[in-house]
Image: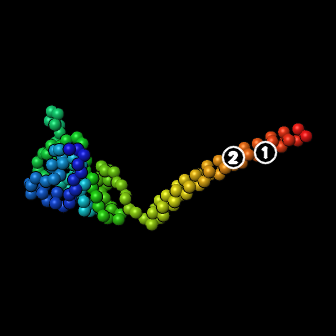
Amino acid sequence: GGDTISFADINAMVDGLRTGEKTLLEDCLVSGRQIVMTNVTEEIDPILDNLIAKTLTSTGKRFTVHLGGRDVEFTPGFRLVLSTHLPNPQISPFVASQTSLVDFTVSLKGLEHQLLNLVVSIDKSKVHKQKVQVDAVVDQHRNVIEELNNSLLVRLSGE
């Protein structure tokens, strides 16, 4: 179904499209599944341009996309994710204008910030619990003081 995510090497998909083999990419397009293409480099093969640009042809209620010399059915729900291990990819302006770039790079500074936020939130929770406990004790002591004051006033007025 549409909830399944498939993973495939981009080079294997491009090779399959070039040789006319049926590929996992085509299966995902037809079934409306998501596919993550891995090992993407800065140069993405132009055979994928129509897909990246979502250049679709409409035939009645069906949509197709031209890939590797043939038209492949395009089902809504299909999503293409391109994944790279490059630290700072310089992708072409065409691809950059057609996609959303998400940088999942983890830096030491970023990890320090996340850890600090986690520690502060845990400490805030502990401090808040302690404050509630201290407030309860203070309220009890105020009540005791008020009772003692009232008792003292009664004794002083009775003498």
Neighbours of disc 1 within 10 Å: few (<14), some (14-19), many (20+): few
Q: Nearer the viewer, mark 2 or mark 1?
A: 1
- Estimate the x, y position of residue 34 in percent, counting from the top left: 24, 49
Local SS, label 2? helix
Local SS, label 1? helix
Q: Quadrant where the C terminus lies? A: top right
Pointer 2: what residue?
140
Of the numbered discs 2 and 1, the one sitting upstream in the chain is 2
Three-letter code for the amino acid on which mark 2 is drawn:
Gln
Residue 103 placement, left or right of 4: right
- Estimate the x, y position of residue 132 in percent, counting from the top left: 61, 49
- Estimate the x, y position of residue 65 in percent, counting from the top left: 17, 45
**Furthest-left residue in this view:** 20
- Asked whether residue 149 appears in the rendered view, the answer is yes
Residues 4 and 159: in front is: 159
Image point 67% across, 50% down: which residue? 137
Image point 52% across, 55% down: which residue? 121
**Furthest-front residue in this view:** 159
Residues 88 and 85: in front is: 85
Quarter of the figure with residue 82: bottom left
Residue 72 placement, left or right of 78: left
Pointer 1: what residue?
148
- Estimate the x, y position of residue 42 in percent, counting from the top left: 28, 62
Residues 54 and 33: in front is: 33
